[in-house]
Image: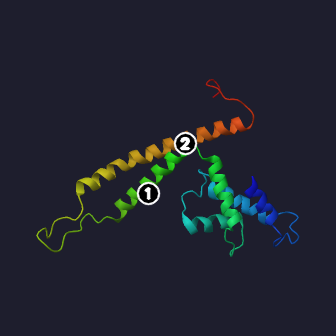
């Protein structure tokens, strides 16, 4: 829990909390860490700076605020805390789905070869394009199923951290 402690200690005051007694900035930064790093956060769909912007706005951090090294270290720490074997699989499947969606979105299936002996022929293999398009719904369904498995694993881990023991009959 060191990264979170470091964020709290680093809060030396902000607007509305000049003496840092309320630790308002630390509270907002820890909320940022949670929303940025939680695998099923509603902000998970955003990427990069857009994700930072959306969370910053939702949490009420100042417009010029950027995540410090302490905040990003806490994000990594929290992501590692909740990582399960199925979560690594989920990340891989989500990345693959993003790449395939980009392929479908950016491929011009009517693009033709302009020079050479194959002039006028299609550049892209239509059968391959159709196969990807047909597999996408199955992949999206697999992502949803994997998310459910991850949620179940995390609930079991939470129950174990709370000092309760789980067994095959406790559901």
Say which of 164 and 24 sits in front: 164
Residue at the spot 63% in from the left edge and 41% down from the top edge = 154
Colour basis: rainbow
Mark 2 closeness class: few <14, some 14–19, many ≥20 residues within 10 Å: few
For mark 1, what is the residue? Answer: 98
Question: First in sequence: mark 1 or mark 2?
Answer: 2
Q: What is the distance, in whole Å, between disc 1 and disc 2 at their CAs?
A: 21 Å
Say which of 6 and 108 sits in front: 6
Percent x, y of residue 124: 24, 62
* 3 is higher (above) or lower (below) than 120: above
In the image, which disc is placed on residue 85?
Answer: 2
Residue farthest along the left direction in this orientation: 117
Q: In the rendered view, does 147 fall on the left or right side of 4? A: left
Residue at the spot 75% in from the left edge and 52% down from the top edge = 1
* 147 is higher (above) or lower (below) than 14: above
Q: In the rendered view, does 81 fall on the left or right side of 24? A: left
Say which of 166 and 53 sits in front: 166
Q: Quadrant of the C terminus?
A: top right
Q: Quadrant of residue 37?
A: bottom right
């Amino acid at each position: 829990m060191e990264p979170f402690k470091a964020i709290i200690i680093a809060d030396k005051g902000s607007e509305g909390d000049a003496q840092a007694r309320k630790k308002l900035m630390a509270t907002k930064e820890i909320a940022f860490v949670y929303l940025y790093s939680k695998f099923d956060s509603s902000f998970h769909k955003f990427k990069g700076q857009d994700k930072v912007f959306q969370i910053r706005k939702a949490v009420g951090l100042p417009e010029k605020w950027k995540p410090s090294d302490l905040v990003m270290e806490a994000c990594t720490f929290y992501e590692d805390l909740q990582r399960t074997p199925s979560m690594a699989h989920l990340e891989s499947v989500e990345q693959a789905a993003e790449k395939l969606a980009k392929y479908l979105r950016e491929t011009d299936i009517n693009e033709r070869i302009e020079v050479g002996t194959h002039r006028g022929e299609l550049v892209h293999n239509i059968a391959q394009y159709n196969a990807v398009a047909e597999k996408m719904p199955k992949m999206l369904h697999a992502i949803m199923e994997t998310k459910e498995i991850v949620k179940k694993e995390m609930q079991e881990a939470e129950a174990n951290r709370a000092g309760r023991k789980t067994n095959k009959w406790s559901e």
